[in-house]
Image (tube, rainbow, N blue to C red):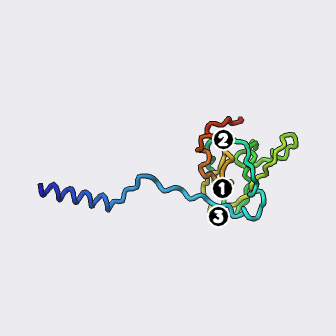
Amino acid sequence: MLARRINLKITTNYLKAVNYVTKPPKPEIPKNPLADVYSASNQQTNGVIYDKKPFKIMLEAGKTYSWCLCGRSKSQPMCDGTHRDVFLKVTQRPIRFQVEKTKEYWLCNCKQTKNRPFCDGAHKQKEIQEAFVRV
């Protein structure tokens, strides 16, 4: 009986020392250093939902990119100038942005993120998952 208590105590102490993690830490959502420079970042409306999942892309530090907010670009997630077509009557402009480190980033493809252009998980909302996606 005593040996069993000692074994149980050692096992309990071992589990405390190992410090198991059940969920991985949430990734840090990057910030756009150009958000204060370009007024397009302050647009009130979002574009049409292009996809219900984010897009992973390698971005270079210091390079300026244009992320499509209208959701109509043929080169998603980047802007191809489709918003300029006067017949589409698109009011959203692309978001100019840079990254501070060269690495892979998740860019929003549902166009509903609050941290433009980076994915913040907005695509997981029920209304977005149930929305019709134009192809």
The CA distance from mark 2 to mark 3 is 26 Å
Q: Label 2, on which residue?
A: 51
Looking at the image, residue 112 lies above or below residue 38 = above
Label 3 residue SS:
loop
Give the residue at x 74% y 55%: 95
Q: Which kind of residue does numbered mark 3 sit on?
A: Glu
Task: Tell which tag, 1 or 2, sits nearer the viewer.
Answer: 1
Residue picked out by circle 1: 115
Q: Nearer the viewer, mark 2 or mark 3?
A: 2
| Residue 75 appears left or right of 90 | left
Amino acid at the residue labelled 2: Asp
Which numbered disc flags the more N-terminal residue, 2 or 3? Answer: 2
Picture layout, residue 134 above or below residue 71: above
The disc at residue 20 is: none
Closest to the observer: 127 or 62?
Answer: 127
Within 10 angstroms of label 2, few (less than 14), some, or many (20 or more) residues? many
Residue 110 in percent (x, y) is at 66, 44
Q: CA distance from mark 3 to mark 1?
A: 15 Å
Tag 2 secondary structure: loop
